């Protein structure tokens, strides 16, 4: 063990599940560990000086921020798993040039609207009554839209991996290992591997997804460490390299 090392990297994260499986997650932006404890001063005597400090309610929290969007962390926060090959109806849209058709206008789309129901808007957001038949949307009385780009919104059936957000599912207990490296501050050589091992970790169930333009949207997960054997949160291990 070296008492003077430099740590400048984030950590790799390993999830350990009750069935014995382990999943590795690299390319983290941050991997944070925080230990808190409540304190209460005990004061007494003349001058009411500090005689002791009482400690209680120790707590440890782990927070991970990957560099890229990761569906697993959404699974972990919800306590549920994806169902593969499930069919659901979702809203989508297409844009195209309206073409004159006597007193109406038409626009071609490639999707298949559920129940042949479509919604048409012009560039200013005004709605127009429309019907769908075999790849063609007919805009009733929409001759004035000819040559304009219109937006056609509709429901369509898709098949994919589905994760449900439910009120009766919560995160599951699992283990987590964090691994990073340490450098000699004088030589800049890697001198140690650092491990933080926690056998029982439980997500707090919170989920925050921020979607913004020109921004790398990511998923973040926060979890609390549960003690094992009554009072052991986990272990910090320093492995010096030869």
Image (cartoon, rainbow, N blue to C red):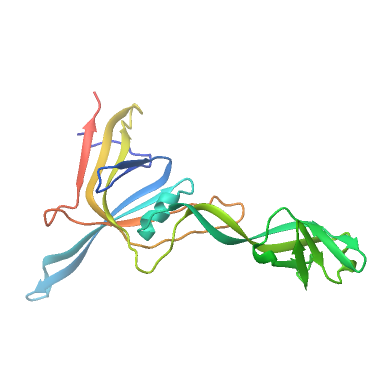
Q: Position of residue 219 (x, y in %)?
A: 45, 53
Residue nearest the viewer, comparing 157 with 232: 157
Q: Position of residue 86 (x, y in %)?
A: 49, 55
Relative to 228, does residue 42 appear above or below in the rendering? below
State the residue lying farthest toward the top: 242
Dividing the picture into quarters, in which one does residue 27 lie?
top left
Q: Quadrant of the N terminus?
A: top left
- Residue 87 lies left or right of residue 101; in this view the side is left
Q: Position of residue 99 (x, y in %)?
A: 87, 59
Residue nearest the viewer, comparing 124 with 62: 124
Q: Quadrant of the C terminus?
A: top left
Dividing the picture into quarters, in which one does residue 125 lie?
bottom right
Dividing the picture into quarters, in which one does residue 155 lie?
bottom right
- The residue that appears at 48% across and 59% down in the rendered structure is 209
- The residue that appears at 90% across and 63% down in the rendered structure is 101
State the residue lying farthest toward the right: 102
Residue nearest the viewer, comparing 119 with 198: 119
């Amino acid at each position: 063990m070296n008492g003077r090392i430099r740590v400048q990297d984030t950590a790799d994260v390993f999830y350990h599940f009750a069935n014995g499986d382990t999943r590795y997650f690299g390319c983290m932006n941050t991997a944070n560990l925080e230990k808190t404890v409540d304190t209460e001063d005990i004061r007494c005597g003349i001058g009411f000086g500090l005689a002791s400090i009482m400690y209680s309610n120790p707590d440890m929290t782990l927070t991970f921020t990957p560099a890229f969007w990761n569906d697993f962390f959404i699974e972990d926060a919800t306590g549920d798993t994806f169902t593969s090959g499930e069919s659901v109806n979702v809203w989508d849209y297409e844009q195209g040039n309206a073409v004159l058709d006597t007193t109406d206008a038409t626009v071609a789309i490639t999707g298949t609207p559920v129940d042949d129901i479509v919604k048409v808007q012009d560039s200013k957001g005004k709605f127009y009554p429309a019907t769908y038949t075999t790849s063609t949307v007919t805009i009733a009385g929409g001759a004035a839209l000819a040559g304009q780009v219109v937006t056609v919104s509709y429901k369509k059936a898709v098949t994919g991996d589905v994760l449900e957000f439910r009120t009766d599912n919560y995160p599951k207990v699992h283990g987590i290992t964090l691994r990073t490296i340490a450098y000699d501050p004088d030589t800049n050589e890697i001198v140690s591997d650092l491990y933080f091992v926690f056998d029982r970790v439980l997500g707090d169930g919170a989920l925050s997804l921020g979607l913004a333009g020109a921004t790398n949207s990511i998923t973040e997960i926060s979890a609390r460490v549960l003690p094992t054997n009554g009072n052991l949160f986990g272990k910090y291990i320093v492995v010096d390299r030869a």
